[in-house]
Image (tube, grey):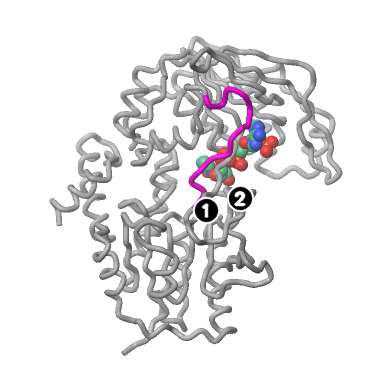
Amino acid sequence: MSIFWKIAVIGSGPAGFYAAGELFRQQSWSIKVDMFDRLPTPFGLVRGGVAPDHQKIKSVTKIYNRIAENENFRFFGNVEFGRDIHRSDLLELYDAVIYSVGSPSDRSLGIPGEDLPGSHSATEFVAWYNGHPDFRNHKFDLSVKDAFVIGMGNVALDVARILAKTPEELSKTDITDYALESLYESKIEDIWLVGRRGPLQAAFTPVEAREFLELDNADVVLEGGPFELDKASQLILETEASKDTKKNIEILKQISAKKSSDKNRRVHFLFLASPLEIMGEGRVEKIRMVKNKLVKQDDGSLRPKATDEIIEENAGLIFRSIGYHGKPLVDVPFDQKSGTIPNESGQVIDSDDSNSLLSREYVTGWIKRGPTGVIGTNKQDAVETVHRLLEAFLQEKIEPRQTSNSSEIESLLESRNVDYVSFEDWKLLDEHETETGLAQDRPRVKVTAIDEMLEIIMDKR
Ligand code: NAP
């Protein structure tokens, strides 16, 4: 009997797949990977986060499909950690566990009025238009004139762009049908992107910023007159700014120089402003903001400091887009402040003794390092984690468990009546979605309800 190390990967987004891929790349190790996801569909934020008009980015799933073809790979979808399987089960059945569950929650602003109807997190809106089953029944009132997006990262730009595009621009994408219908009815005219710092500190990337120059029915406006940088930012631009930052500045200058036309919508870039309060009788009606100036910190960074200039604007919808945040997993160490699982190069630190590392638990992706970086960033991250895992196995002389009967996990899930989905099952659903999409000249038409997904799989099996 050949002996395998059995690794459980929790979460099937890019981080999980890159970890599986790196495990399979090890010539001198025989490794089996079982990957679990609480949804019947794999690929995490590639399906539920990447904007529908960014289809090229989604082609990264070809790499994940190749990894899934490995004979030592299995997918268990529709299996929720902490509900259907527990840490103790995995530590009994596997040699190691890699948590790659991402950062499914969001950060809040902590200002009055944030919970008024009409104020939402960008993560909810993104998950809604992308058809995440948990968010498909959310409602967003697009019958208002002004929408504010707080934050200047790529997620904020995604939200602003989706609101600014015409339904025709989106109709050939895989945006959900219900989102497209709502967008057809949208009365939004002004979309405001609000950054607490200046143009040089914007977190978005040039490719995403440039798209605002090419919208069919929306002008783009740089608020606050002609483009100008404060002295300290100008110095940074000339001495140490990255290529991307320099490109961002060029694009913002182009935006600033742009003459307005008669397009029906406008996207406003408003820098150096922080929201103070969201106001309204029973729903969002106004936003009160303060203008900031930048102040140099001891570490050289430029942070926002409130001035006494207040701005008040009508607002019907507000999306806070100030970063994702991790959620704790049952029985797994968690640092609330950073929203991550404490780790050393990917190896989980014991919550009872911060000097000691858990030899069979690892972490990769956003739940390891926080919600930063693009999809590809997760590859390097997973490589570090996997190598740490293999080194620990060697150092601690961890032998593969002799429980190599691979049907144990299936028996366990069946005994708990868990209706799990294999990768072949997902392929059936994938085929259904892409065939429906083909008939409409779209990449796919997403199924968004879990029972419907399971029914389609059952019918096609
Ligand atoms: P992000 O890049 O970290 O941006 C967060 C933004 O929120 C920053 O502008 C930040 O400003 C601001 N912010 C934070 N706290 C705030 C506060 N209390 N008040 C006002 N503003 C505040 O996060 P993200 O946009 O959620 O994106 C997450 C990651 O996914 C990023 O690495 C991003 O590049 C990536 N992503 C990539 C794409 C793509 O490649 N197309 C698409 C989507 C997401 P400060 O800088 O002042 O802190």
In the picture as drawn, the residue positioned furthest to the left comes out as 459
Looking at the rendering, the stretch of residues picked out in magenta corresponds to 102-115
User: Between disc 1 and disc 2, whose residue precedes?
Assistant: 1
Classify the position of the N terminus by image quarter. bottom left
Q: Is residue 205 visible to the viewer in this orientation of the structure? A: no
In the rendered image, residue 21, in percent from the top left (x then y), is placed at 44, 67
Above or below: residue 456 compared with residue 224: below
Viewer-proximal residue among 130 and 22: 130
In the picture as drawn, the residue positioned furthest to the bottom comes out as 1
Q: Amino acid at mark 1?
A: Pro
Residue at 56%, 67% (x, y): give it.
Answer: 385
For this view, does 386 lie left or right of residue 142?
right
In the picture as drawn, the residue positioned furthest to the top comes out as 262
Classify the position of the C terminus by image quarter. bottom left
Label number found at residue 328? 1
Q: Is residue 164 visible to the viewer in this orientation of the structure? A: yes
